[in-house]
Image (spheres, coloured by chain):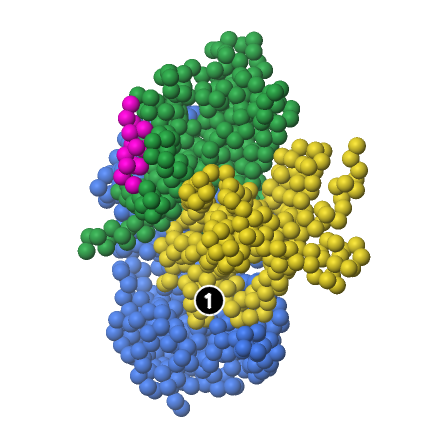
Chain colours: A blue, B yellow, C green
Amino acid sequence: MTLAVQMQGITKVFPGVVANDHIDFSVEKGEIHGLLGENGAGKTVLMSILYGMYHPDEGRILVDEKEVRVDSPAHAMRLGIGMVHQHFMLVPSLTVLENITLGREPVSNGFLLDRERMHRDVKEFCDRYRLDVDLSAPVYMLPVGVQQRVEILKALYRGAAILILDEPTAVLTPVEVEELFTAVRALRTEGKTVIFISHKLREVLAICDRITVLKHGRVVDTVAAGDASEDRLAEMMVGRKIVYEFQKRSVTDQRPVLTVKGLTALSDRGLSALRGIDLEVRSQEIMGLAGVEGNGQTELVEVLTGLREATEGTVILHGLDITRATPLERIRMGVAHIPEDRYKRGVVTDFSVMENLIMCGQRDRFARNSVALDFTEASICSDEMMRDYQIQAPDKDTPLRNLSGGNQQRVVVAREFSRSPRLVLAAQPTRGLDVGATEYVRGKLVEMRDNGAAVLLISADLDEVWALSDRIAVIYEGRIVAVKPVGETTEHEIGLLMAGGRND
Amino acid sequence: MVDLLDVINVGLFAAAIRMATPIVYAALGGMFSERVGVVNIGMEGIMLTSALGGVTVSYYTGNPWLGVAAAVAIGGLMGLVHAVVTVKYAGNQIVSGTGLNILAMGFTAYMSQILWGSRGASESVASIEDITIPFLSDVPVIGPIIGTHSPLVYLMPVVTVICYVVLFRTPLGLHIRAVGEHPTAAETAGIDVVRIKYMGVIVSGMLSGLGGAFLSLSHLNLFARGMTGGRGFIALAALIFGKWMPFGVLEAGLLFGFADALQMRLQSLGILPPQIILMIPYVLTVAVLAGVVGKAKPPSDYKPYKRE
Amino acid sequence: MTERLTGAARRALADLRRGSEGALFQVAAILLAFIVGALVLYASGYDPVSAYAAMLRGAFGDMYGVGQTLTQATPIIFTSLAFLVSSKAGLFNIGAEGQFLVGAFTSAIVGIYLVELPWVLHIPLALLVGAITGGAWGLIAAVLKTRFNAHEVITTMMLTYVATYLTGYMVNYPFKAPGWVSQTVKIAPSAELPRILPPTQLSAGILVALALVAFTAYLLRKTILGFELRAIGLNPSAAESAGISINRGIMTAMFLSGAMAGLGGACEILGVHRRFIEGFSPGYGWDGLAVALVGGLDPVGSLLASILFGALRSGGMIMTRSTKVPLDIVIILQGLVIIFVAAPAFIRSLLKRRRK
């Protein structure tokens, strides 16, 4: 039994976070090895190191039991390592055949493409690995599952003996997943080694020979698939660690603030993102929406804020149907939004701190009349907000991009919360923040809740959801699969539901 | 009273083919540039400068073909400038193109004044004679239309075919398209993205230069201020109308060439105001962009490529 | 076209903004242009020093020169502000020339045919009509963009040609002055913008221009609309999340932009030419583009750069008369400035080399 890959003592540190912490990871030749863990556990970083996209701060790598230093993806490919990323590297208007042979096309007569040979060579690969693709189809016309197959073929065509698949089932339908598994098994039969990165434990159990579980940048354990169960894997993935405890005011008179019924919506790519969401969030509560990213949370928030159209269903706020309301109308009705992508939707980095603080209110609170801005009010409020929310900046005219990530998030929080909203939609509010800022934001969410707001907290960090929520809902593949008061469930159960496990 | 046959006759169609030539050359050039991801709206300026350069060389050497060669070279040089600004320094493509146009406007008038003392036009120079293809011109009906033309006109469909072959039948063509559509994917496949971009832009300059040479050394035999008359922009319209494909561009060019020939014919007959006819290509383009004539999807996203 | 082109244009504009910040870049670009221009002059057998000196003298040497400089600068102020406003919203309106012509023509029509009005009504009305029609011309491109995703770079360019030929048609046929070629009759005296510095052609149009500079600065820095347009230009996703309507913003920006250019055309007709002549604009729309960039996309910067370009044009005329250098050297200089401004990275690398 030779080891195709050995990674020993791999450590990789990014500013503020230890992505990989002295990881020992090895893969036998000819096996399908699963790398399992939640978002942020360090799986992709580890494999990116193997693929030469990052360099480790510590540790060594051995390929085929020879020590190597992987400098670049090109180098990795020369070593026989191929990687299929979540975002494909395919040229849309070129055919499958052309994409696979890109950069190493066979020629006839010195300069013309030898399409026959191209076809022959690649077809051989398709047959051997049982990867069925229409070689003459332009890539943009193909469904995502087929595009993925093309990426796999591309790696094989370039001589990959070790194939890293990064969250390959994230974008596949159940049928396509089965087809992928068939292909992966065929790869194994041909003697290829496959590393299967995923957060979906049922799939990992179904396809892999052995499974390594990562958590918070460290290896928890490596087990044989036959010896593991869903429960055990879930426990390893999630662990039990409540970091912060918050004192919450006891609740008196709750009423529903947000009621969502049968909400259906499509993603940007036109696929089904929300498949009939039913949800209710009450005043004076934090409803935590637990789930791994990519299960519809983004689209849900967009529909609730009015940035995305719902194809079916209704959204009711305080008894009023806002399904067709504009973002501005919702803001005026007391909806606050902390976006998951601060830089995209949250702030304008070239605006000053003050300009960012008055956004959303430029037509109302900070308007002197229907034309001009009220700079006096803006100035006073900005100073107040900077004080109350402890925003650290030289002054309010500093461009926002000069502030740290934590302070930028404070600006967002200040802007949204100082409106005394009735509904707070907080999406991954502490992502990318240091400990202090994280504590602060979480404290503020509790404060909003105590003051009567309904808070919908969407987070992939189960610890956070657990610590803050009164009730927890789990979203999986566009549906709410469970809603439970915090006292009536366990982290373990929630972790299971998040990963698609069934609730027995 | 004007007879319909005074307008629609053999001469008109022959003129249509003739007037399509500079547009097709420039548009093919624009096609290469845009397919590697660089907008080149400076084609008007490049055509104009090359037209002047060609005439100048013909003036001093008496050989119009040397003039054509010079025009192509000048076009390539200006393309190089555009490439350096937009690829090497990631400069704004629209601004660079506009700068080239304005620079060309000034430079050609300036040089014209210095060389020939008047700001209107140059002296006449040795130009390219039309040739007649014997058996072709004997064919009934279409013979007179396609039988006698400048060699540069006959070259036009040849160049179009070459462009098609390069783009769709060679590895280079695949690389060009990959670089324009998904430079990162091209880079990871081992393609030298920067080199291909430079090449595409320089070729666009050279082809525009050829178009300019046609105007001053074949269609006419002198340089006149502003003689390109917006054809560089019409070429852009033809490019969009032709959906960035060589044969589509050829057809679009013929259409615009027809409008141009018709306009000249109508002008000489005094039927419709020339300005109304002259507007047609531009209104046509706007209609195309509005999706009236199908969806026009460009082949790239025109971002400056940053190597990670 | 597609959102991707829009994104690219927006990125480019943001880069331009950042690169153009600091007058250092603008000055460097101008200097570089003059240096290259000097080389061109030298290579053609002229003395660059005396040519530039003559230009300077002509532009600023005496009251007449200053007056003509300001006269040439006036229309450029309008078109540069037009480009500036649209660029703040992330749009590339390169059709200011067309919008300028449309405004010029319609104001001429109002000036010619509404003869019964006293000047207090006639002038503002003509200016208003010029502005509104120019704005409408810009709005066409905005509608094409919001409805059909047609990129404004191409549509505004095409519309400029349409405007050029349409106005050309108008003054050669329906509105042609009998006995003249390619122009209308003179406008009524009640529509004339007064000359404020005889014997130069400087008209009250410059006062309108200055007012517009102030208005633009006010708009961008102090108003809700300005705030929202800038947000759209810098980060449309965030603007949308903050309740700003992107489509409305695009249409408003293009209308304002076209209106400014149209107003400039109107002032030029009412103040300088007093009739619409085909081809009266030597490309003021294009100057405006260069000026806005050289001015760092700032209203006051545009004002200063407009004066510079106006000086180039008027001083150039004097230079030609005295040194026989072809006037087109002015246009060469403009083209060079634009190319140098296109790539701040180039100037940055030059400066870095000098520091070493």
In the image, is residue B296 above or below residue C268? below
Q: Residue at x 23, y 44 (%)?
A: A392
State the count of labels: 1
Q: Residue at x 47, y 11 (%)?
A: C120
Whether residue B265 is visible to the viewer of this picture, yes or no, is: yes
The x and y percentages for residue C275 are: 52, 21
Q: Main secondary structure of the magenta part?
A: helix
Span highlighted in magenta in the image = C47-62
Which residue in the rendered view is the most extreme toward the bottom?
A1
The x and y percentages for residue C265 are: 48, 26
Q: Amino acid at mark 1?
A: Ala
Image-quadrant location for residue C303: top left
In the image, is residue C344 above or below residue B117? below
Q: Is residue C347 magenta?
A: no
The x and y percentages for residue A230 are: 46, 73
Image-quadrant location for residue A48: bottom left
Q: Is residue C51 magenta?
A: yes
On what subunit does the disc labeled 1 rest?
B
In this view of the protein, which residue sits in the foreground, C116 or A423? Answer: C116
Element marked by disc 1: helix
* Residue picked out by circle 1: B186
